[in-house]
Amino acid sequence: MRINNNIKSLVFTLLCSPVLAHAMTVDELAAQFEAYKQQQANVLGKIVQENTQLKQQNQALKTKIATTLTAVEINTNAVETIADNMQASVGGWFERTSLGAYGELHYTNRSKEAGDHQEESDFHRFVIFLGHEFTDKLRLYSELELEHSIAGDGKNGEIELEQAYLEYDISPQLSAKAGLFIMPVGIMNETHEPATFYGVERNEVEKRIIPATWWEAGIGTAYKFDNGVSAEVAVTTGLNLNDDYDIRKGRGKVSKQTANDPIIAARVKYTGIPGLEVAASILHQTDMGQSSDNVDIGAGTLYEGHTIYSHSIGIGTFTGKALYSHWDIDANNSAAESQYGWYLEPSYKVPTDWGDVGIYARFQQLDYFSGSVKNYDIWETGASWWLHENVVLKANYVYKQDTLQDNHDENGFDLGVGYHF
Amino acid sequence: MQQTFGNNIPTAQVLWISKALKPTVEKILQHQMGFLRVRYWQQDTTSVWILEEIGKTKPITIGVVVQAEKIADIKVLAFRESRGWEIKHEFFTNQFKGLYLTPDLHLNTPIDGISGATLSVRAMTKISQLALLFAQQLSISK
């Protein structure tokens, strides 16, 4: 394009400039034209040369890009192969071992009607879970707990082995377990990580009547039907009540525990509708005193039933819990023969930009025996704030009414922080 | 896979989690991401994702079919926990069908959980959110 323009310009000059045409001879003009042609040929040569060089560079770049793409593909494949191998690798024991934990710190502030006032801070529970998968079908679960921070002679706390059992999958529906495990009864007995329940302290009904957390040594089997029904049966060591007929104190915790009279436990649970759980348990022990001559007591049966229902309403989720539990004991004390408790707990949880926030109310009624008859109505309300799905801050107010004795009511508030992973 | 694509199962592809996408993935997971890329199968607007998330202590493997940025199907492929097995069944998974991701990364309808299986339910919910997020990335890259 540039050459054409120059030629046009020259011809125009030659034809249209009478001054130049008059001043130059034809030979001079021819020479000048030849010189000009040579000059243009040189320019053209340079352009062709540059074009060739550019083509070569372009080809080199194309080759380089292709090489780079091949290298990227090789690297990608290598990374994927390494990642796949890492995922598939099951060589080391640690790759089949899992670790978990939970903990809860409480502050309790109580005023009694009689005038006593108590303020207490307690790192109530510090728990480590350890699990190991020996094979795809055989696994170990264990839970070690430190209660009240310090254990030892004269200290408030204790170290407890709460779970240590082996579980084997006979089929996808049927499993069997053996070892030290939590009894299949109640809501909180098996699920009690702090972020999973409302209230700083666990509810009194399950604590006193069931008595949660309750574990024994034994064997068990569970079957899960496809329609959401599951059934569980276990034979385990049993409670050992003394003459105060206190069920909670009867837990042996599998520590050189007398094992004359076992418990047969059965539970049926239905979770076939999302948000709904309905469960019933029966546990029977032939002698609640482990055949001891020191206490006049016979067989005992625990009946427990509960329902949980959760459903989204508005921006949040409503959950209602109801539980009833009743020990029927053949005791030489009519007041200790029937020990029971029930509670109702509605709650509402909403998601916020700063984590979920939930409020709840709980009413509990207890009638149990511990040296004498105890009967309480407990009113409770409070809130939980989940900073993370596994980290919770809690606050609640409690009013505990002693329905048998005047001037023994108490009220106060609790603050707590809990976590699990 | 055959249920979704019939006999013409597309070749598996890989979505690498970019630096820009990582914070969003971790916001859904509420913990650090343990993977660099995810494998998927895609045909037209349908994609299948196979993802894993820890329930209580063990990973649960879940397959999610996303169609036009909505969940068409979700299935537990491997369940290793001792509790929370109910999430395997259709009476639970049916409520995920048709759900989509809101701009704030939640499912458009809350999932009704299972008492005692909170952690398994949470794992499945997170995986469904991730599958929807990843399927969105395919649309964006087009």
Image (cartoon, coloured by chain):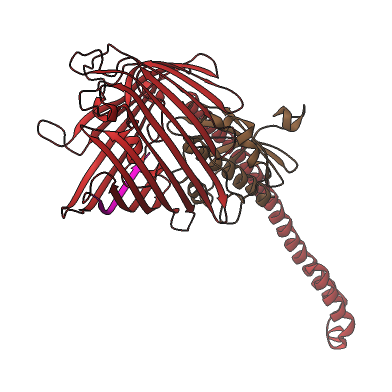
* Magenta: main secondary structure: strand
**Looking at the picture, how far across and down is residue B22, in whole percent?**
50, 48
Left or right of A66? Residue A343 is left
Q: Is residue B49 visible?
A: no
Q: What color is chain B drawn in?
A: brown
Q: What color is chain A drawn in?
A: red
**Looking at the picture, how far across and down is residue A261, in whole percent?**
30, 13
Is residue A411 found inside the magenta-colored segment of the image?
A: yes
Left or right of A159? Residue A364 is right
Is residue A245 found inside the magenta-colored segment of the image?
A: no
Q: Which residues are magenta?
A: A409-421
Q: Quadrant of residue A254?
A: top left
Can you name the residue that lies furthest to the front here?
Answer: A334
Q: Is residue A261 above or below residue A269?
A: above
Q: Is residue A109 above or below residue A283?
A: below
Can you name the residue that lies furthest to the left here?
Answer: A154
Q: Is residue B62 above or below residue A197?
A: above
**Looking at the picture, how far across and down is residue B47, in whole percent?**
68, 39
Q: How many marks?
A: 0
